[in-house]
Amino acid sequence: MNKLLDSFPDRNWKNAVFPIAVGLLAFAIPVVNHGLQFVVAIVIAAWVLHPKRSLKPLWKPFVVFSGIFVFYFAGVFYSSNVSNGLDDLVQKLSLAIFPLMFATAKPLDVRYVRMVKRIFVLGTIAALMIAYGTSVFDFIATGDIREMYMSNFSPVLHPSYLAMFINLSIAILLLEIDRESRYRHSELKLWAVVLLLALSLIFPAAKMGVINFGLLMVFFLVLRGVQGNFFHVRTALLVAVGVLFLVFFKMDPLASGRLSTMVEVLEGSEEGVSQPVVESTTARLHIWKTLWSELPAHPFGVGGGDTKSTLREWYAKNDLDVLADGGHDAHNQYLHTAVAVGIPAALWFIFSLVYPLRRIWKKSMWIYAFFLMSIAINFAVESMLEKQSGIVFFTFFNALFYFFGLRGTDENVPVNPAP
């Protein structure tokens, strides 16, 4: 409780409502799927009561981050289905709301921002415990080991999202380990949690989650080299976590089989889409090829309200009836945005992901760097902004890291520096 109080200026609980709401949302993102908008509403209400700062010094990043919402707003006006367009616009309100709230709210204490990241990790662990509990119960009831894997593993989260949350949690903990260097007992506990999270990636069996974990290993090994800490026992422990994951992953035929199938598809050994259930990589390749062929005729998009119906029409036109009947989205946020509101909008969105990099490097905000790398890769295979959980995850952390996490602080400063 004292640590929480110390995170608020002047230990004044009147100013604590917004920070508490932010922490609540950080915990809810990995745990809640349907209904997450109600937690967002609590944050908005708390922001209204929170002390404000001028937007003037931060208007540029605010415009960059929220600009994509303007494209979606304009897209409603040239949609033939305005009702669908308005529904889509409401779902995407977070694209503007979080940059506005975090740019104008009185900054949260750096220690509290660190606590918010830890709360997110706790939420991810809670989501995993729920997943383990429900999947084990289903396995006992049915005797089918597949109840422990992929979409059956978590009753709440899509496998790709769960894997994404796990990877971000691992990254947060790895940076915490460097900051907890004076406390060996704390460091050992954190390494145990890192290993648990890494091995848990086997059960969602998300292909991009596994690839992202590999990139995470490379990212932190390179980071340790850049910081001059490569020849350290923590580097050996990091490699050990990666090796253990690889061993357990290779020993698991269900999880490793998905990655093998993806490789076979990319090598061209599985190209058909006539079967009732299409392998996910095969579906994506055909979807992307179709969109690339159709986009030149619609450089400014078809309008937010017509995106779903247009995609079905394009799939049917290109003899992809299985995909049309399944109502598949673009499985690529950049392409999905281009289809909906145009190529300029997609380019603006990409620019918004690149925009923070200079300040990230200058302020050594490595968790933000990993977050952007991870999210950019996931955008390439998932239309994350078409789901509430994806929108909130992206906009919440992007705004949190930029507006509250880049204030001349170094992530590797110890939590309790010596006096």
Image (tube, rainbow, N blue to C red):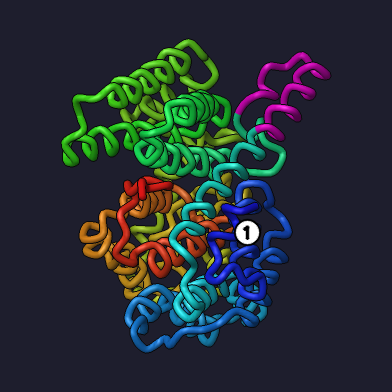
Which residue does the image show at 31% across and 28% down from the upper left?
267
Where is residue 42 shown, x and y percent of the image? 70, 70
Marker count (numbered) = 1
Which residue does the image show at 56% across and 82% down from the upper left?
51
What is the magenta range? 129-149
Quarter of the figure with residue 66? bottom left
Is 45 in front, or is 155?
45
Taking the image as shown, residue 44 lies to the left or right of residue 185, namely right
Decide: is 398 above or below 418.
below
The residue that label 1 is drawn on is 25
Which residue does the image show at 55% across and 71% down from the upper left?
10
Disc 1 marks a residue whose amino acid type is Leu
Where is residue 38 shown, x and y percent of the image? 72, 66
Taking the image as shown, residue 234 lies to the left or right of residue 51, namely left
Q: Residues within 10 Å of mark 1 (few under 14, many from 20)?
A: many
Where is residue 319 shown, x and y percent of the image? 49, 49
